[in-house]
Each structure stands twice: as structure tokens, then as C-alpha cells.
Image (cartoon, helix red, strand yellow):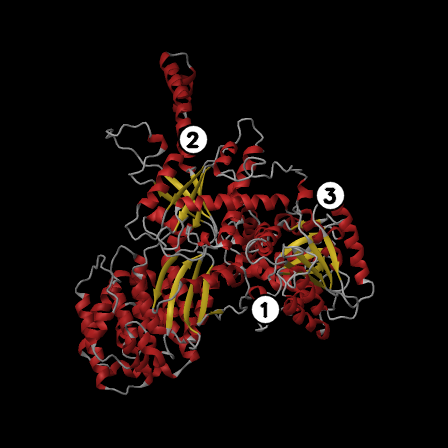
Amino acid sequence: MLDAFEILTTSGIVLWRRHYAPLSSNVIDSLVRDVFIEEKQKSGGAENSAPSYKKDRYTLRWTSAKDVGLVFVAVYRSLLHLSWVENLLAAVRGLFTKAYGQELRKPHTLKVDTAQWNPMFDALVNRLDTGSTRRQSDTLDSEGPTELTPPSSSAGDDAHEPPPVPAPLFKKPAIPAKKGVVVDDTTSTDATPVPTPDTSRPATPGHAASHILTAKGGPGKASRRSRKGQTFNTSAPASSGDESSAGRTLKGSGKNATKGKRRWDIDGMAVEGDDDGVLDYSAPATPGPDTADRELDVSDVNTSQMGSHTGKGQFVLKDLDDEVDAILASSKQQSTSTTTTNGEIATGSGLLNTATSRLTSLFRNVVGGKTLSKSDLQQPLQQMQTHLLEKNVAREAAERLCQSVEINLLDQKTADFTSIDATIRDSMTKALTRMLTPTSSLDLLRDVSSTTSGPGARPYVISIVGVNGVGKSTNLSKIAFFLLQNRFRVLVVAGDTFRCGAVEQLRVHVRNLSALSQREGVGKVELFEKGYGKDAATVARDAVAFATNRDGHAQVQGQGMLYDVVLIDTAGRRHNDTRLMSSLTKFGQLANPDKVFMVGEALVGTDSVAQARNFAKEFVDTKGKLRNNGVGMDGFIISKCDTVGDMVGTLVSMVHATGIPVVFLGVGQHYGDLRGLNVGWAVDKLMK
Amino acid sequence: MAKIEDWLTWALSPTISAILVTLIFSLTLPVLIHYYLYKRAVARELPTFLLLGPSGGGKTALLTLLATGTASPTHISQAPQTAICQLPSTTRASEDQYRSENDTSSRSQPSILLLDTPGHGKLRHHAFSSLTSPAAIKGLLFVVDSAVLSSAAGLTEAAEYLYDILLLLQKRHTQGKTSKGPQAIPVLLVANKQDVFTSLPVGLVKSKLEEELGKVRLTRSKGLLDSGIGVEDDDTDEEGNWLGEYGAKTFKFSQMREHGVEIDVVGGSTNGEGEDPGSVHECWSWIGANI
């Protein structure tokens, strides 16, 4: 069963929520964090299937209405398989945005009065909750039993219903009448304990819906409300047999409504034929006495709103009441209908109209205020993608970025005097900024000094990995230089026991560095090496043990640690060679570095994505979990940035592939040419 | 036709009545235009207060509490949100400070615009951009979760964010082009969630943040340069990037005063369940004093 349903704004305010079971707000927080902000999970491509996200024992499904900035989230236990939740989300989105969209579009809106939404939601749940109720009906807060079998007692049913809105009910007499209906209905169904599946299943919920909603259908204070109520009422008959008599009477009294309903009925028939047949038979089968009452209700509703709003009413009716497919289709239609109106008009009418609409769309492009449709976005997005590709962003990353921008902008209106291109640019800048900005900034000095001081002090271990020839040793010595400047004692470990000359290369670096540091009177640096052919992981472990001075070397008095920072160089390896890559796992576990940085060169193109992914996935701990909260590594160092000019797309590709932030950039040949990443700078270069 | 011509002739004729009408017209028109423009300008620009702080501090909850009187349940924000709030009648705005207690003439409580920004690390650019925007920002409310501050990670995150904000304010002040300097933006540190059992008291929140800011300042000054530094050609010297009094060993909020940033610390709880309305009251009175 559903555990919770929440409707929240993008600014984080919960507009409405219903918890069926206690639920920590952490669950939805982490959904927002992981999916919407950090985009760890790729959003499902298909529009009709609500994407899902698993957290703890829960599965979360959501859908969003971008134009009003709403997110609808349904939470249920992962054990259950609730296929109807998708429909619920679609229906709620349609109805809620219709009811409150106007209000929410106003600036400075923090809250909307959602008291009237409660009965609406209950009705929706009852209506759409199909398969799983049989399993878990008792957990549904109040109306469980009514779904299992036709309601056993009308009193219970009435008592549990959320009270109709106390606001000006302009039709008091209608309520007792309806109660009568309920009683009658239940007794009738009780009399036939094994009803035909069609009549039994959704009958009561549908009825409840009509009951509740007619109750508040009247008040003139909110026309939307009443319209909805009316549509609920009309909606009931299409699938529930018992209510179809009401539908008939409705047909009789409101001509417009009849038309609308029939049209959708035909749609439904196209999908599933025999349902309607049953409906037809059951209509006369329902006992007569209450029909008068119903007629009363219905006519009341009709007098309130029917005629003028049928056009809109049809939409809601379609949402609620057709078969599953129809609902999905309708919600889809609903979402696209507003955007494609322009296009539809153009295609639907003659040549002349096409020309004028094209002219207006051109004009709108200049003036702004244009609602963006898929076709509008296609070409500029294609241009944007090419632009990104030219900046050396990997195709995969560029495509995904464009996709997210498209999702973001679809159905949106462009601002005044803003062309589509500018809007896309703006949105892309935001997307890039969000992607490149790390969730928490890395302050290496802070980390080092807090690890190496205080109780439980130990050396801080950093290891550098990467493909051959990207500049691992060079960047390692740059980091060593930076640390030396800050008066740390650094031990450089020659973990590359493979390539000839690797150790000698590091020795030269260390000699230079120690000469530099001696001259400036700052930290000290040493090389730790065991020659060639040894296992790198063992060398690294020994080096850490040496730096920690665990054995208490005789010549060092007191003090404990010999070095503050251990920098481990590793052999370069091809990322798609499993034999070489697998030794990284052992290395990671034995040396247990505090930070693992991967060096990637800015020159590399599409391959960067695969490199980043393959390296990240090797760093698993003994339990088989990726280290550093499941991302594997701690940061990228992008080397050779000075050689590419504006084409810094590698940054984007690597961050995109793994979600690991870029911490350093190599921008020159000297020891001092190491920089932190300035996101604004990178984005500027990319968008130039 | 003849009528209009008559009128025009009369208007240009040297009669006393025509001169009088012209005089009245020419004198009142500028006044009317002035009032019209003045009214419009005032109506548009409300004093703006910015809500900042790390994620989970309770910014959005505070926003709803200030704007509507009750705190809504909230989740992590993805987008900024604005709200117009009216000062409660119990709070006196700064413009009312000389008004007599016994003055019974009706006074209109001023409205303010509150701007809530997302606190998540990836979305802080909203906050920075609205800080540098030309809109008249009257003050910042930096909301922290005083329970989270007792953990090292939480404290560091809050301090780093606060450091960035304060440095931005300081640069805004020191690098002002005009001799008058930009208008000072005061900061209110709201130690939120005082109702939580593990929360730190206000005094401790202040001292812990000061201490942590000192550490952040130290490592930032030693840290690597930004990749963007060469491009901007700003050539900011070390002193320009040093928060507070240059060369001072420890950081104190009072050091920011010389850079035109006044920092106050108050406690509060947005989840106070009615028994603690005073918490918001302090925020209100600060807002009232800084309008």
C-alpha cells in the first residue's frame, strides 16, 4: 500500500501530504538531493512511466509539473509492486495543477489552501487503487474494507469519509439525499455478495467520490472546485456499474455533459469493449427507489456549473475514469496539449494559417513569451550539442546535458525579449554550473592538518591513478610542492614498479623539491622506493607503515609520525585492461588512501568517460562497496589544461560520467602551476 | 471644427483667464507626474532580505513562518522562492523609532520581500548571484542548524559557506568604486532549531563559528589559486582576500565591522509549537530595525 504521498514545490515547501505510515522526511530529502540536484540517477527517458528511486526499504515514484514548479512523490514499500501508482501520479498532477495552478503561478505564493484536496485525493486513490488492495487493504488508512468487498456497513463508510468542506454548501438538502444513496447502494451490493467483477471492484469508491464531490460541488465561491466535483460525478459511471444510473440521469439532464462523456466512452470502448456492455446492463439492474434521489443530486450539480465548463470537464473525466491506458494517454495528452496547441493549429488549418502562425512564432521568438514545444527546441538544442562537442565534451555527456535542458524547458515560456537560443544558453549554463560545482568543496590543507594532529594522528595518504602518460608523476610532484609550501613533511612513494625509469624520474623530482624546500626553509620531502618488480600494493602499505613509524624506529626520538603526508604514485594502466585494473582494488584496500585522485588529461576526448568510469569502479572496499560513499574516487586532476585553450570539455565529460568533482587543474610546466577549479571560469570557457 | 479653433484662439489670446489656466496647468503637471512616478517606484521596490545558509538549516521553514505565521513542512529546496511578508504589529520598523508609544494614529506596517535560496552545495550560485544583483538588499539572514554545528563536518560546511558570503560582502565594500561606498548589508546569524535537544546555545554557536571561520581563513589564504584568477586579471592581493582584520590571529565577527558588515546572532526555532514565539520575534525585530 502507499506509505505516503506528497506534493512539494521546487522551493521545498510541502503543499500537501498524506502519510499512511510514519515516514522519515529523510526519504524524500534524499530523493531530491540525489535525483533532482545531484542527478546521480539518470531520469527515465519514457515520459509515460514515472521514474522510480529506491531508498532504504522504500520505492519512490514521482512526476513533476515544471510549469508550476511542483513535484509529486509517492512512497511505498519496495516489497510491493504497485503499478497503479503511476496512474495516480499522472491523475494527481493533472487535477492538482488544474485546481491550484493558477494560484501557484502567481509570484510569492507559499501556500495554497489544500483542505479541499483531501477528499479529492481519497477519491482518486480509491478510484485508481486496483490490484494491490487485495493484498494490503488493511493498511489503507480508513477505506480499506470498502474495497475488499462491497461495503458491509454504510455507517462506517460515511464515518470515515473525510468531511466535506464546511464552506458554504449551497445545497444542504443534497447531503441527506446522497446518504440515502449510499445506504441503498451498499445494501444492494450486500444482497449480491459475489458480484460480477466489473461492478464490485470500483463501485463503492466511485460512489464515494461522487458523494463527496457533489457535496462540495455547489459552492459558488470556487468554480473550479465545483467543476471538478461535477466531473468526478460524471466520471464515476464510466467504469463502475452501480453508478451508471447516475450517469444515465446525468446524460438526460445535461446535454453537454452527455456529449463529452460519450466521446470518452467511445475511446474507452476502443481499448476494452465489453466493459461498457456490462455497464449498460447493470444500469437498469440497480434498484429504482434511489434514482429519484440521484436525479436530485445530479440536477443540483447541473444547475451549478454544468453547461459552461464541460469542455474543461472532459479532461478531468478522461483522467479519472477511463481504463488505465486511457488515463496514461490522457495525462500525456494533457501535458503536451498546451504546448502543441500552436503546432496543432498550424497543421490543422489551411496554408494561410500556417504562414501566419509561423510569422507569429518568429515574432514571439524575438519578443519572448513563447511556450516552448519540442519542435521549437530541437534545432537550437542540436546547435548547442554541436557547440559542446566542439569544446571537446564527450558525445554522451553532451547528449545528456541537452536532454536535461530540454526536459527543463519543455512547456516553459520564454521570458520577455528573450529568444529561444538565449533561453537555452541560460539553462545550459545553469546545468553546467550545477554539474561542475562540487557538493562539498575540498579543502585539502584542512583535511591534512586535522588528520595529522590531535588524538589518533596518522599520516594522510593520497594516491594518484590514471592512464599512461597523462602526467601522474608530474601532478604528484606539484601536489608535493604545494604541501611542502605549507610546511608538511611529505613522503613520496614510488608505486610504479613496472615502467623503466619511473623510480628515477620520481627521484629527480624529489631531489628538486627538497632543494627548493631547503632553500625556503619549509617542509621536507623524501622518496620511498623498493625498486622494480615488487607488488605496488605491498610497497604502498610498507610506506604508510614507515611514515606512521609504527615500529618506532630507533633513530627518531618521540614524535611518533615521521611524515605528515604520503603521496603514492602508481603505474599508468589502460582503463580497459581488466588484468591491470584489478590490481587497483587490492592497492586501494592495502594502502587505504584518504584520497584517491585520478589524473585525466584535457586533451583526451570521448574516451574520458570510459576512463573515469573504469577507474572509479575499481575502488571497492572489502565489503564490495565503492569507497567514498559509492563513487569510488575523491577527485579528478585535469592536467595539460594550458594546451587546450577553451576546449575544456574533458572536465564536463569526466564529472558527468562519475559525479566526482574536479579538484585540481594542471595549467603549466612548473611545480607551482596547480590550480583549484573555478566553476564560473570553466563554464565561461565552455559557453564561449 | 469651429469650436476647436475657437478654443485654440482663446488659449493663445492674451486674456487673463487663459493665462491663469495655463499657469495652473503648468504648475500642477510636474507635481502630478512626480507623485505618479514616486508612488510607482515605491510600490515596486520592497526592501529585500536574503535567506542563506547550508542545506537543512531551516531557511524555507523560516520563510513560511515569517510569511504566513506557521511553518510548513519542507524538504530540500531546488529553487529560490520569494515571499512578501508584513511586519507584525508588535514589531517596530526603524522608521517608526521616534514615534511615541501613545501615538494612536494608525501606522501601516511596512512589507518586506524575503528571498529564500537553496542551501545545497551545488545550488549556491543562486545566493551569490542575488547578492551581487543590483536589487536593494537590506540584510542577510544566515540560518544554521545549531544541532548540526556540534559535528565537525556540519560546522565546517556552515563556516565555509559563511566565509564565502562574508568575503563577498567585504570585497563589495572594499572594492567599491564610489567614494561613498555601497550600502552596508548587515548579517543576522540565526541559530535555528534551538528546540532540538542536542542544539548548541547561541553563544556557543557564535564562538564556534568564529573559531572555525578563523581556520577556514587560514587554509584559504594558503590554498591554491583559482583557475579563474589569471583570466579576471584582478590581481587581488593577499590582503584583499583576507577576511576581517588583516594579520589578526583569531577571527571575531566584530572585525567585520570595519568593512561595513554588522553581524548579530540570535537563536530561534521554526518548529517551536507555539510555546516559543519569541524566537521569530527576535528575527522580526532585527528585520524591523534594518528596513
Mark with earlier residue (1, 3): 3
Which chain hosts label 3? A
Q: CA distance from mark 3 to mark 2?
A: 65 Å
Identify the element where label 2 is drawn: helix
Which chain hosts label 2? B
Give the crowd class for mark 2: few <14, some 14-19, many >=20 residues within 10 Å.
Answer: few
Q: Which residue is painted at 78% across and 54% down in the image?
A: A509
B174 w.r.t. A211: above or below: above
Q: Quadrant of the N terminus of chain A?
A: bottom left
Q: Which residue is painted at 41% across and 52% down in the image?
A: B58
B290 w.r.t. A146: above or below: above
Residue B37 — which label? 2
- Residue at the disc numbered 1: A626
Image coordinates of residue A573 in percent, x first then y, are 74, 68
Corner quadrant of residue A564: bottom right
Q: Which residue is painted at 33% across and 48% down in the image?
A: B68
Q: CA distance from mark 1 to mark 2?
A: 63 Å
- Amino acid type at image mark 1: Leu
Image coordinates of residue A351 in percent, x first then y, are 56, 59
- Marks 3, 2 in one chain: no
Q: Which residue is painted at 59% across and 44% down in the image?
A: B218
Image coordinates of residue B252 in percent, x first then y, are 49, 39
- Residue at the disc numbered 3: A520
Identify the element where label 3 is drawn: helix
Direction from residue A216 to residue B187 in the image, left or right: right
Closer to the eye: label 1 or 3: 3
Identify the element where label 1 is drawn: loop
Closest to the observer, A441 or A269: A441
Which chain hosts label 1? A
Give the crowd class for mark 1: few <14, some 14-19, many >=20 residues within 10 Å.
Answer: some
